[in-house]
Image (cartoon, rainbow, N blue to C red):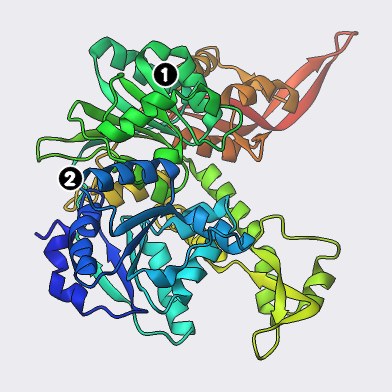
């Protein structure tokens, strides 16, 4: 099996590329994307006195790649910058604006950036458009998780009448995952650390929330190193910059645990066979897969144990609805032939807070700005990404059903028995306190007659949607099922005889009393 980029792309292939070509390279983490740039592309660019621009989406990754370039003596041909610096120079027309025509190859490393970062950076479309408009350079797009962006690019190429993209693929292989485990609670991550300290394990925690990551680190500072984005004004002060610099240079950390946000989700390498445990609390699937790839596998014996926080079906449905709401205005605008008037009629005195729709200048036939005129434009990568997310959530809910998120990832990573169709992942049951409470209700034969009687049970289950507790029996039973808690709420009619102050008994009917039964 061909496992490296240099196995599928020869120098002769590269020599056939022409300025303006769009080259899409899909390859798993550790398939030699950096090696290909530092060797194959470097040699061919140097032959003709050309240069290479490497675009990278994390400043940490830029630093690590610069160290590699300088160590290999390749800085005479290869320049390394962030996508964000390209965008800033273009938008602000600064003297540092990057001229892409100077480069023979413009390499977009981890080019899923245009999609994934669009949720919090609405400027990703700027760098994408700059690259696509650069006719003097060969555009090389590389990613391990760029399939959504690749679909958008093919649509863009077709819509704009461009030459078809040149595509290469290295087969994906997730056999380096020794076991796949899912968990529900934040407190379980703390239990992982406690067990790791006791057994001398070494691992990486990827946590989306900087606050959550820091609080976990703060409890176990002696054993951990913490990292988050330099743009985080609240928690970056707790980052030991010298330690992070050494991690980038040495491609390893000395502490037992690295606790980081998604600022380390791509580009950086950890080469250390002792790192065997990867814990992930990240929503975006592409970022989640990238996180697993930070540990570079050295041989067939070098495997990892992966632990992923569950997103249950209720939350998946909420995420899907949220995405649908975010594209609502853009959908209406497109469905009504891009009419600004109709958009304003439908959404009076409203702006698109998601920045999918934005104000843009209008130009005449010669490309000159029309004074005092503007229109609404759609941030296409951002819009397309939301639509792809909606499609993914729909697949998880409709195709996979119960435990849709877990089954979707298990199928992606190969944790399914092809003969029986059964999934081979493990689910940690963390509902001990709740199960004790429910068991006592069964033993004591507790019947909850009225709404007010149910409040304690509802709080104990603590299932929320949009910040509000779920209260319906059917919904709560779905939650108990997803958590693999073997109890259910039984709803049934019952009668009670109530004695008044005079000793007279009056019959009272309760149409929907609750009690807990073992499932």
Q: Residue 258, image x and y in percent?
A: 36, 26
Give the residue at x 19% y 25%: 274
- Residue 95 horizontal side relative to residue 376, left or right: left
- The answer to which of 272 and 431 lies nearer the viewer is 272
Where does residue 46 sit, x and y in percent of width and height? 22, 66
Q: Is residue 273 left or right of residue 505?
A: left
Which residue occupies the foreground of this view, 161 or 350? 161
Q: Which SS class for mark 2? A: loop
Which image quarter holds the N terminus? bottom left
Residue 27 position within the rendered picture, expressed as x and y whole percent measured from the top left:
25, 58
In primary-sequence order, the first of circles 2 and 1 is 2
For residue 2, side relative to residue 118 (left or right):
left
Q: Which residue is mark 1?
A: 190
Mark pair 2, 1: CA separation: 27 Å
The crowd level at tag 2 (other Cα within 10 Å; few <14, some 14-19, many 20+) is few
For the point 23% across and 73% down, the residue is 48
Q: Quadrant of residue 150?
A: bottom left
Q: Is residue 76 visible?
A: yes
> The residue tagged with tag 1: helix, strand or loop?
helix
Q: Residues within 10 Å of mark 1 (few under 14, many from 20)?
A: some
Which residue is rendered at x = 47% and y = 53% of the image? 397
Picture layout, residue 268 above or below residue 192: below
Q: Is residue 435 visible?
A: no
Q: Residue at x 31, y 19 (%)?
A: 255
Residue bearing the label numbered 2: 175
């Amino acid at each position: 099996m061909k496992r490296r980029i240099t196995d599928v792309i020869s120098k002769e292939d590269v020599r056939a590329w022409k300025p303006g070509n769009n080259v899409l390279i899909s390859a798993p983490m550790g398939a030699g994307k950096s090696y290909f740039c530092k060797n194959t592309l470097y040699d061919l660019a140097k032959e003709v006195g050309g240069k290479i621009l490497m675009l990278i989406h994390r400043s940490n990754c830029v630093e690590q790649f610069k160290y590699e370039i300088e160590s290999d003596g390749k800085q005479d041909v290869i320049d390394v910058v962030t996508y964000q610096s390209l965008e800033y120079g273009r938008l602000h027309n600064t003297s540092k604006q990057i001229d892409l025509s100077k480069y023979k190859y413009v390499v977009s490393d981890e080019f899923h950036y245009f999609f994934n970062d669009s949720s919090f950076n609405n400027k990703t479309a700027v760098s994408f458009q700059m690259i696509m408009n650069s006719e003097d350079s060969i555009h090389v797009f590389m990613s391990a998780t760029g399939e959504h962006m690749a679909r958008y690019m093919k649509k863009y190429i077709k819509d704009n009448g461009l030459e078809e993209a040149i595509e290469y693929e290295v087969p994906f292989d997730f056999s380096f995952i020794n076991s796949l485990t899912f968990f529900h609670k934040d407190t379980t991550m703390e239990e992982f650390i406690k067990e790791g300290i006791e057994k001398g394990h070494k691992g990486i925690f990827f946590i989306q929330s900087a606050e959550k990551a820091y609080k976990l680190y703060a409890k176990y500072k002696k054993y951990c190193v913490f990292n988050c984005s330099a743009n985080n004004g609240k928690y970056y002060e707790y980052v030991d910059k010298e330690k992070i610099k050494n991690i980038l240079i040495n491609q390893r950390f000395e502490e037992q645990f690295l606790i980081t946000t998604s600022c380390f989700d791509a580009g950086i390498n950890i080469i250390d066979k002792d790192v065997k445990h990867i814990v992930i609390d990240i929503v975006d699937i592409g970022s989640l897969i990238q996180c697993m790839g930070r540990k570079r596998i050295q041989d067939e014996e070098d495997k990892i144990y992966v632990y992923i926080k569950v997103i249950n079906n209720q939350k998946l449905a909420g995420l899907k609805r949220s995405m649908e709401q975010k594209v609502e205005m853009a959908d209406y605008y497109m469905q009504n032939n891009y009419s600004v008037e109709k958009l304003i009629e439908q959404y009076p005195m409203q702006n698109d807070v998601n920045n999918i729709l934005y104000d843009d200048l209008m130009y005449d036939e010669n490309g000159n700005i029309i004074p005092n005129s503007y229109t609404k434009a759609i941030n296409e990568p951002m819009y397309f990404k939301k639509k792809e997310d909606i499609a993914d959530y729909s697949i998880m809910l409709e195709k996979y059903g119960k435990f849709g998120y877990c089954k979707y990832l298990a199928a992606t990573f190969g944790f399914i028995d092809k003969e029986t169709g059964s999934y081979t992942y493990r689910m940690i049951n963390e509902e001990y306190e709740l199960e004790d409470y429910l068991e006592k209700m069964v033993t004591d034969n507790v019947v909850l007659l009225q709404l007010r009687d149910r409040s304690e049970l509802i709080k104990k289950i603590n299932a929320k949607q949009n910040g509000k507790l779920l209260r319906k029996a059917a919904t709560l039973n779905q939650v108990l099922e997803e958590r693999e808690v073997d109890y259910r709420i039984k709803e049934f009619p019952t009668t009670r005889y109530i004695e008044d102050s005079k000793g007279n008994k009056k019959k009272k009917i309760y149409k929907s009393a609750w009690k807990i039964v073992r499932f």
